[in-house]
Amino acid sequence: MQSSLPLDLIIELKDCQIWQQDNLVLSDVNLNVARGEHIYLVGRVGSGKTSLIKTINAQLPLKEGKAVVAGFDLAGLKNRDIPQLRRKLGIVFQDFQLLTDRPVSANLDFVLRATGWKDKNDINNRIGEVLEKVGLGHKGYKMPHQLSGGEQQRVVIGRALLNNPDIILADEPTGNLDPETSEGIISLLVEISKTGRAVIIATHNHTILRKFPARTVRCQDGRLIPVDDDEEIELEKL
């Protein structure tokens, strides 16, 4: 079921209860995210960050509360509408989840064909566009194992951009990367937000929060708590 949001909002969660199977993970979640906004989601392991992301992309059902994501009402979302919602979302995983038996271009080709693209020229042009955008314009022929961790994560970001999503959800996108590479990945995601896409980054990387400051919310004690701009974010608290 599609619903409407104010023009600048792309995500609106109001009084939501976030469940993981039979466990209530987060209560009374309120979160608005605007188009072009880049925000951080922080919290200890098990605090609810991933469950919140999975609720936004309809991997976990919303049982209570109001949530409108990219024009879709999650509370009334039918199974048949989930693929349409997910075409408006790009997901960036910590562990890449690339198909290891085929080169980068074929990984992206697979996603486009699975989401309804048919014309070979259109597919090849789109693959070229996203690889250029993530700085891998000449590496489409490479197998995933021939790429560095940072390059593989850039492929994942490119994959997330294929269908021109309104929202990018990045769950610990630098968790397996060294500090310098991590900064390059976050810088790329920040630049993507400047193209009008909302970008939510779940992270516990202290350095990134300092180097690329943005609005931050914390999962803590079963709640989603705004972090004040002048609040000291200590790594051990995240």
Image (spheres, rainbow, N blue to C red):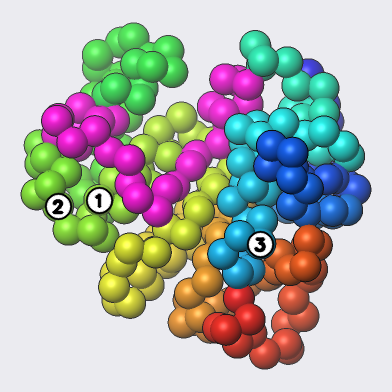
The answer for how far apart the CA atoms under marks 3 and 2 are is 32 Å
Secondary structure beneath disc 1?
helix
Closest to the observer, 27 or 225: 27
Q: Amino acid at mark 3?
A: Ser
Closest to the observer, 128 or 108: 108
Count residues near mark 1 (Cα–Cα under 10 Å), then give few for <14, some for 14-19, many for 20+.
many
Residue beneath disc 3: 47
Please report whichever mark, 3 or 2, sits nearer to the chain's N-terminal start.
3
Residue beneath disc 2: 147
Closest to the observer, 116 or 152: 152
Please report whichever mark, 3 or 1, sits nearer to the chain's N-terminal start.
3
Please report whichever mark, 1 or 2, sits nearer to the chain's N-terminal start.
2
Question: Residue shown at 77%/80% (left/top)?
Answer: 228
Left or right for 6, reference 179: right
Q: Amino acid at mark 1?
A: Gln
Question: Residue shown at 35%/69% (left/top)?
Answer: 182
- Is there CB contact under 8 Å for labels 1 and 2? yes
| Residue 93 seen in render | yes
- Is there CB contact under 8 Å for labels 3 and 1? no
Q: Amino acid at mark 2?
A: Leu
Where is residue 76? Give x, y as percent. 82, 22
Where is residue 30? Give x, y as percent. 84, 54
Left or right for 19, reference 127: right
Residue beneath disc 1: 152
Where is residue 54? Give x, y as percent. 61, 41
Closest to the observer, 4 or 84: 84
Check residue 172 for magenta coloring.
no
Q: Which residues are magenta?
A: 82-108
| Residue 38 seen in render | no
